[in-house]
Image (tube, rainbow, N blue to C red):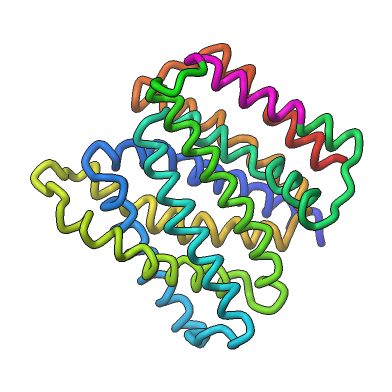
Amino acid sequence: MKRQDRYTAIVILSLTQMVLSGTYLMAKLGLREFSPLALGFYRFFITGLALTGLLLARGWLHLPQPKDRGLFLLLSFLVVPLNQGLFLYGMNFTLASHGALFYATTPLVVFVLSCLFLGERPTRLKISGLALGFAGVMIVLWEKGIALSAGTLRGDLLLIFAVLSWAVYTILSKKAVAGYPPLYVTAVSLSLGFILFLPAGIPAALGQDYVMVTGKGIMAVLYLSLLTSVIGYWAWIWGLSKLEASKVTVLSNLQPIIAALLAWIFLGEAVTWRFIWGAAAVAAGVFLTEKG
């Protein structure tokens, strides 16, 4: 790959981090006016329509092969009802900066799961990175005190399980991507995931108080649907095809910093030294794990 093309990929992925970092701010804004399940319903309704249109335009609007349909069904359940259900409920209680920080630990969780179930061999450098990343998360959790009654901690714990489900989705999607284009895997899993989300999403949408919905709430839904779920994910997959995974992962460490800055500017969330040290430890842990 030419050096100029690599620089172009890095610039595009860096701009993508701005989009993905804004996800946590927009989720908080949306949750001020929508219930978590109603927000998820409208987000993935619009996402499903957009991605289905892309599949139709490319001539890919078809079901997976029969032998792969069980895998796609599992991917769909993991990425929308489970992951997004936990994410939106978690963001309802915790800070936007915390959401970005916990999702930045995804490579560490993937590494642990790969060692447990896929036979990946741990190295000293990877173990050191894992320990450092875990320490960073604990620093942030301890900021509010380990107490189950604390609202922020409740949201943080939900986000940890959301990251776990996202990591499992990431591992299983590698098998799907081996036989299908990345855009097809993303579109089918998110669109089918929306269908699985309907039993919980429809009652929430019908019970939503629309009197309190303003332009900010609508903007949040459109941002999460079109920028995060469609453009952001698509650019991310494109970047993975252009750069080494380790470089893409290092760029993803920008998210907690940008998200914390946006939350401070627009939501008034304080950026504490504990969070800064925790975010630095997580970023260093991810770097060591990828380096190893």
Q: Residue farthest to the left?
A: 211
Position of 159 compared to 135: left or right? left
For residue 87, what is the image quadrant? top left
Near-viewer residue (231 or 270):
270
- Compared to 123, does 9 lie above or below? below
* Residue 230 coordinates in the image, percent (x, y): 46, 61
Which residue is at a point 64% across and 62% down the rendered structure image? 238
Residue 134 in the magenta stretch? The answer is yes
Which residue is at a point 37% across and 31% down the rendered structure image? 93
SS assignment for the magenta stretch, majority: helix
- Compared to 51, does 95 lie above or below? above
Q: Residue farthest to the front?
A: 148
How many discs mark residues in the rendered view?
A: 0
* Residue 257 coordinates in the image, percent (x, y): 56, 28
Which residue is at a point 49% across and 27% down the rendered structure image? 260
Near-viewer residue (226 or 96):
96
Q: In which quarter of the image is the C terminus?
A: top right
* Residue 48 coordinates in the image, percent (x, y): 39, 69
Which residue is at a point 59% across and 46% down the rendered structure image? 164
- Compared to 15, does 143 lie above or below? above
Position of 244 compared to 73: left or right? right
Position of 238 compared to 86: left or right? right
- Compared to 140, does 196 lie above or below? below
* Residue 56 coordinates in the image, percent (x, y): 44, 83
For residue 233, what is the image quadrant? bottom right
Q: Quadrant of the N terminus?
A: bottom right
- Give the magenta-colored segment's residue range: 131-145
Residue 221 in the magenta stretch? The answer is no
